[in-house]
Image: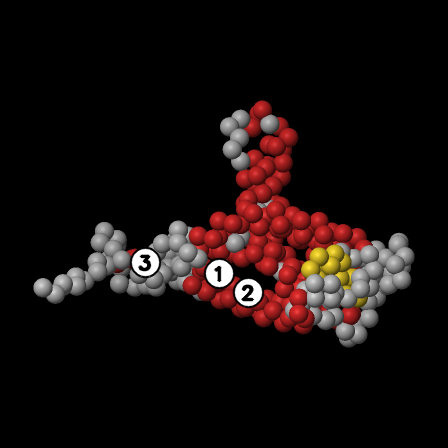
Amino acid sequence: MASIERPRPPAGVHTPGRAAIPARHLRTDRWWLAPTVTVVVLTAFVVYSTWRAFANADYYAAPYVSPFYSPCLASDCVPMRGGADLAVFGPWWGISPALIVLIFPLGFRLTCYYYRKAYYRGFWSAPPACAVAEPHARYTGETRLPLVLQNVHRYFFYFALAFAVILSYDAALGFRDPAGHWGHMGLGTLVLLANIALIWAYTLSCHSCRHIVGGRLKHFSRHPVRYRMWTWVSRLNAHHMALAWASLVGVAVADLYVYLVASGAFADPRFF
């Protein structure tokens, strides 16, 4: 006897017991503006970073190195005077060395708690905004592939710390002149310093950092040092969203500046 398909019960906002509101939402403000800006900015960054990652050129202008290419792990990197040129891997058949590096900082941002909220709303409408029904009939959260992989964020945090240290070293090298002499500074020095300051602020404001510093403590009074660190990280954490956007723009601006100087389109002003 052929089985009879039964209609699926209503799901999502049409689940029995939910308020029967015919309108999709009752908001009267411009709730769509935030997810739209998210899509535009993130799309622009993805396009720009993809172009620069595959360019494999104009990423070093002594003494500045692009954050997209540091540390340079391939043997076909351009010679960098004093830079983080490790040459761990071979030439990789002409593949841009940036593709070896960017997987770690991008993985940290892709799995970031705030960025998840931003691109879930902007690209997937899950949901598009507070008090606005999402168009999906089912919701499984981050319990299934591929979104269950978002839990690796805490491990990407340790890689992000390592890269922040390396980029701090690159920023310190900015206090040299093109010949390698210390005690000099140019506009690029300030650009790299601003970039690494934003990267450290964003990294340390991470929710994983806050948990590592002060999580699983039953009595803060018994751990005054960790409690003090936890309060500092918590203050940064309150600005995590702003720091996420500022550091994203900052790293793109730093790379663009190095590209303009390395390609000869712009001469780096030297202050002393």
Tell me which numbered mark, 2 or 1, is placed earlier along the sequence. 2
Q: CA distance from mark 1 to mark 3?
A: 18 Å
Quadrant of the rendered image containing residue 69: bottom right
- x, y percentage for residue 156? 57, 50
On screen, residue 170 versus residue 12, left or right, reads right
User: Which residue is disc 3 drawn over?
Assistant: 138
Q: Quadrant of the C terminus?
A: bottom right
User: Which residue is disc 2 drawn over?
Assistant: 42
- The extreme bottom residue here reads 265
Where 216 sits versus 264, above or below? above
Q: CA distance from mark 2 to mark 3?
A: 26 Å
Q: CA distance from mark 2 to mark 1?
A: 8 Å
Q: Secondary structure at mark 2?
A: helix
- x, y percentage for residue 168? 74, 51
- x, y percentage for residue 262? 78, 70
Q: Secondary structure at mark 1?
A: helix
User: Which residue is disc 1 drawn over?
Assistant: 119
Q: Is residue 230 visible?
A: yes
Which is more toward the observer, 145 or 269?
Answer: 145
Which is more toward the observer, 151 or 138?
Answer: 151
Under mark 2, the amino acid is Leu
Tag 1–tag 3 contact (CB < 8 Å): no
Tag 2–tag 1 contact (CB < 8 Å): yes
Under mark 1, the amino acid is Tyr
